[in-house]
Amino acid sequence: MADRAARGLVIPFVALLLIGLVAGDLARRALVRPAAPRSMRVASPAPVPGAAATGGGGRTMAAAVAPAATLDPETRAVALLRIQREGAETYLPTMLASGDSALHRWGDDRAGRPVRVAVMRETAPGFREVFFANVGWAITRWNAVGLPIYLEQVADTAGADIVVTWADRLDSNRAGRADVSWDRSGRLAHVLVTLATHAPDGRQVLPSQMVALALHELGHALGLGHSPVAADALYPETSAADLTVRDRRTALLLYSIPAGSFKQ
Ligand SMILES: [Zn+2]
């Protein structure tokens, strides 16, 4: 009985700590930069798999989102405790506090089977050969994080898990987007990344900007949400030349807890 009573106390305690953590993160966000435009999420009773599109230009849109299954209470409590202990230097609490309160990532079953990334050879106006190298470099940077999954660049889009394609321009105020779909467990199933050769203002994207775009959109392709810190690759209007410690820590923490919905 005593054990059960103690456990009963631990769970609300963890929840309170996490709320504090998220509030702290939001307060820091308000101090560091003006808040990014709020993400817009449209809940819908669409069938599984879910799908969301996440752009790099400060806007996140999602349509036809099928909710991931809710974690069982014990798994949820363990995951929240882990986030409370290890999440302070990450943007995972921010990710969890926004949108549908769900985390999506590639499943643990992919640890021994690489996630295949096909970077398409079809080009768009303004395309430069160096952009291929920029995406390839971004892939190596994510692989260097030490996640339990590995991104393997493949030539053929057939059977690819992540497809990277090109566009002249994208709609609205962005130059990259990731269309992400997942299964009912919240495990990622397929991602289509689109990178634009021109910014919304019509200027050609520079190779350094393509690196930032590729790091950002591949982060979404791994399941990461936006960071409120301007230096991070997952900041909505990123100009990051490389992943930050915070990007790496967030990805490592994401891959140490289960995918799924944290709603109670
Ligand atoms: Zn984004």
Image: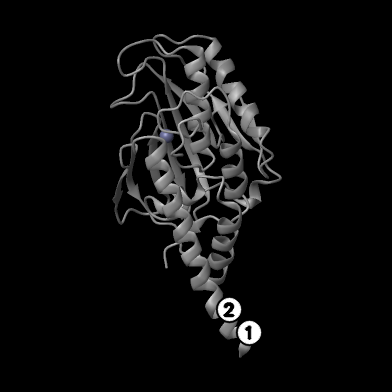
Residue 40 at x, y percent in the picture: 29, 44
Tag shown at residue 119:
none
Element assignment for label 2: helix
At x 44%, y 57%, the residue is 68
Residue 155: which quarter of the image?
A: top right
What is the three-letter code of the residue carrying label 1?
A: Asp
At x 39%, y 10%, the residue is 204
Left or right of 96: which side holds 248?
A: right
Q: Nearer the viewer, residue 84 or 57?
A: 84
Please give the residue where the numbered disc 2 appears in the rendered image. 7
- 129 shown above or below 151: above
At x 45%, y 51%, the residue is 24
Q: Is mark 2 within 8 Å of ligand 1?
A: no
Q: Name the residue at the bottom extreme.
A: 1
Residue 4 at x, y percent in the picture: 59, 84
- Quarter of the C terminus within the rendering: bottom left
Q: Name the residue at the right extreme.
A: 112
At x 50%, y 23%, the residue is 212
Badge 1 density bin: few <14, some 14–19, many ≥20, Cα 10 Å: few
Residue 179: which quarter of the image?
A: top left
Badge 2 density bin: few <14, some 14–19, many ≥20, Cα 10 Å: few
Contact flag, marks 1 and 2 (Cβ < 8 Å): yes
Residue 189 at x, y percent in the picture: 51, 45
- Quarter of the N terminus within the rendering: bottom right
Q: Quadrant of ligand 1?
A: top left
What is the three-letter code of the residue carrying label 2?
A: Arg
Is residue 155 in view from this perspective?
no
Tag shown at residue 3:
1
Is residue 45 in view from this perspective?
yes
Q: Alpha-carbon distance for marks 1 and 2? A: 6 Å
Residue 41 at x, y percent in the picture: 31, 47
